[in-house]
Image: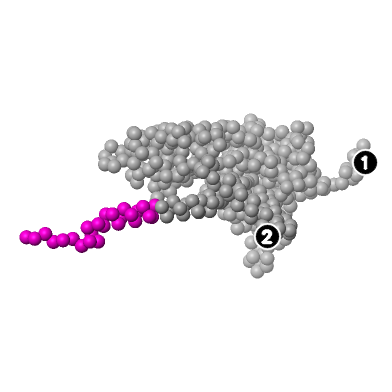
């Protein structure tokens, strides 16, 4: 069979392709040389934008407003200055050219050697938790690929992990508290102790997000909070946990802080509160803060079981019906409160049956604040008298309908001596001071979403209102103004919130002179 002659275009096609590649390479090199300044400036603008984005993310939320104001001021000045816009564009192009030069340090695209070692060690430590022998393609295996299990990670300035997203297999028992606690304890130990971590489990997506939480602000002093009647600010928490902020003053500075608001009154689902903590944890500070807020719209009865005199600043103030530290005085005050609750219930019921609104003398809130009532219960048992806690049954059971609120503060060592009515009806709970996860579970009824740290400032803890999630809490600084160790700014802030004396000082002197 005769050989068919190939067309000319196919017979010498290789030479044409080689010439085309050479011409394209020459054109690309020429275009790169011509467009090199533009490429450099574009790369520099991208690096400057990334640096500005990081700067914005690292800026605290309360300082972003001032940063925007400064940027707007600079833009306004540049606009008003003659040739300002032209000079600004030239300066921006020069900065972009300098940042985009070939010798500039490029942005890191991955972890360095030490960070890789940390991630690998953490991955190896999680293998016993997230692996199973019958898994044909295990996500976690000794010597496996850690980058598949950790798609997102971040490190702080010290080189320690500050954020980590973990993928885990679907067969892991993420619905069991014991399994979760084991993983959280391991991550806390391997990622670095001494910090507070938050663990967010996504059971549907089989992911665990680990974040290092910044410490809550401890410089918030007692002040008037912008709240409605019946709302009580227990303290302040993380911005991501609540959908509300309060404007607060820090000297001459003002910023918005997310609060933990406890709603009381007739429509409250958690009408009474129990605060637990060790000595020096800040439970007395919490009660003092609640008393100052309650006195804006109601009356207060205080029972100081410890007899420490921490509530002496409230004695004789307008709205403070009694400040008792002795057994007889506490019994008399609580008995009156129980009878007052019954009177309010009867008056309200009669008014409703007659088709009238509730009387005005039943609408003013009444607060019963008891600090360490078990001390008085022990004294009553030693004398064979009546336990003061027994007088709380009526206010605890019917206080919501009668606008009576009970707040009890006690220590961990005496929780077993609290009355059954107190433990049953105080559904709003606060735990302050250094605690263990077991103690938090026993008081709050749910484990905390973060890892408790051994060293915490006074007033630092957790709060849970009914069946709501557990929140971190920092109580505003409300020290005793009569304490000589109280800082002067905090003393002035508390004294400014105290209501005036019921009897003026001049009348007291006249009464004392008449008695003499």
Q: Residue at x 57, y 48 (%)?
A: 97
Residue 462 versus residue 406: which sits nearer the camera? 462
Viewer-nearest residue: 101 or 302? 101
| Location of residue 183 (image quadrant) | top left
Disc 1 crowd rating (10 Å Cα; few below 14, some 14-19, many 20+) is few
Q: Position of residue 108 (x, y in %)?
A: 49, 41
Q: Residue at x 26, y 39 (%)?
A: 134
Q: Which residues are magenta?
A: 1-25
Dominant SS type (magenta): helix
Residue 491 image position (x, y, % from top left): 77, 39
Q: Residue at x 54, y 38 (%)?
A: 156
Quadrant for the C terminus, please: top right
**Can you identify the residue that label 1 sits on?**
514
Dot 2 falls on a residue whose secondary structure is helix
Callout 2 crowding tier (Cα within 10 Å): few <14, some 14–19, many ≥20:
some
Q: Is residue 10 magenta?
A: yes
User: Quick one: 84 or 159, which is closer to the camera?
Assistant: 84
Q: CA distance from mark 2 to mark 1?
A: 40 Å
Task: Return the residue at label 2.
Answer: 347
Q: Is residue 162 visible?
A: no
The quadrant of the rendering that contains the N terminus is bottom left
Using the image, determine if residue 59 lies above or below residue 381.
Answer: below
Q: Give the left or right position of residue 418, taking residue 298 as reference.
A: left
Magenta span includes 324: no
Residue 433 locus on image (x, y percent): 60, 35
Which residue is painted at 34% across and 33% down in the image? Answer: 142
Q: Nearer the viewer, residue 386 or 409?
A: 409
Question: Marks 2 and 1: CB-CB under 8 Å?
Answer: no
């Amino acid at each position: 069979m005769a050989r068919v002659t190939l067309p000319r275009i196919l017979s010498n096609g290789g030479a044409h392709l080689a010439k085309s590649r050479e011409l394209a390479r020459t054109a690309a090199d020429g275009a790169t040389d011509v467009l090199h300044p533009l490429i450099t400036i574009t790369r520099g603008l991208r690096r400057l934008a990334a640096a500005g984005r990081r700067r914005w993310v690292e800026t605290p939320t309360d300082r972003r407003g001032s940063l925007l104001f400064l940027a707007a001021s600079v833009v306004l000045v540049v606009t008003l200055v003659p040739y300002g816009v032209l000079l600004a564009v030239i300066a921006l192009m020069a900065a972009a050219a300098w940042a985009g030069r070939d010798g500039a340090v490029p942005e890191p695209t991955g972890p360095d050697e030490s960070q890789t070692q940390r991630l690998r060690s953490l991955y190896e430590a999680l293998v016993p938790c997230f692996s199973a022998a019958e898994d044909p393609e295990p996500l976690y295996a000794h010597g496996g690929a850690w980058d598949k299990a950790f798609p997102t990670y971040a490190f702080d300035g010290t080189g320690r992990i500050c954020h980590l997203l973990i993928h885990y297999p679907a067969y892991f028992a993420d619905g069991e508290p014991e399994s979760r606690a084991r993983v959280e304890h391991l991550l806390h130990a391997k990622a670095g102790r001494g910090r507070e971590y938050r663990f967010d489990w996504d059971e549907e997506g089989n992911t665990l997000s680990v974040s290092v939480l910044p410490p809550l602000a401890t410089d918030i002093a007692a002040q008037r909070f912008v709240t409605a009647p019946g709302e009580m600010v227990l303290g302040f928490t993380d911005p991501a946990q609540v959908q509300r902020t309060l404007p607060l003053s820090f000297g001459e500075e003002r910023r918005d802080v997310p609060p933990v608001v406890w709603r009381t009154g007739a429509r409250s689902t958690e009408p009474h509160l129990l605060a637990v903590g060790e000595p020096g944890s800040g439970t007395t500070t919490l009660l003092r803060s609640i008393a100052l807020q309650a006195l804006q719209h109601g009356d207060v009865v205080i029972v100081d079981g410890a007899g420490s005199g921490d509530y002496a600043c409230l004695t004789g103030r307008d709205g403070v019906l009694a400040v008792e530290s002795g057994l007889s005085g506490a019994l008399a005050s609580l008995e009156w409160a129980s009878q007052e609750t019954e009177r309010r219930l009867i008056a309200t019921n009669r008014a409703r049956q007659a088709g009238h609104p509730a009387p005005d003398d039943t609408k003013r809130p009444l607060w019963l604040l008891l600090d360490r009532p078990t001390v008085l219960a022990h004294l009553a048992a030693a004398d064979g008298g009546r336990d003061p806690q027994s007088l709380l049954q009526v206010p605890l059971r019917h206080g919501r309908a009668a606008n009576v609120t009970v707040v009890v503060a006690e220590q961990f060592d005496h929780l077993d001596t609290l009355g059954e009515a107190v433990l049953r009806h105080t559904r709003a709970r606060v735990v302050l001071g250094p605690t263990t996860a077991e103690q938090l579970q026993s008081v709050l009824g749910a484990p905390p979403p973060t890892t408790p740290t051994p060293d915490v400032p006074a007033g630092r803890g957790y709060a849970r209102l009914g069946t709501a999630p557990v929140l971190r809490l920092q109580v505003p600084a409300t020290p005793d103004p009569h304490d000589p160790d109280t800082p002067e700014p905090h003393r002035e802030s508390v004294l400014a919130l105290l209501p005036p004396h019921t009897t003026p000082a001049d009348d007291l002197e006249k009464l004392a002179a008449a008695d003499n």
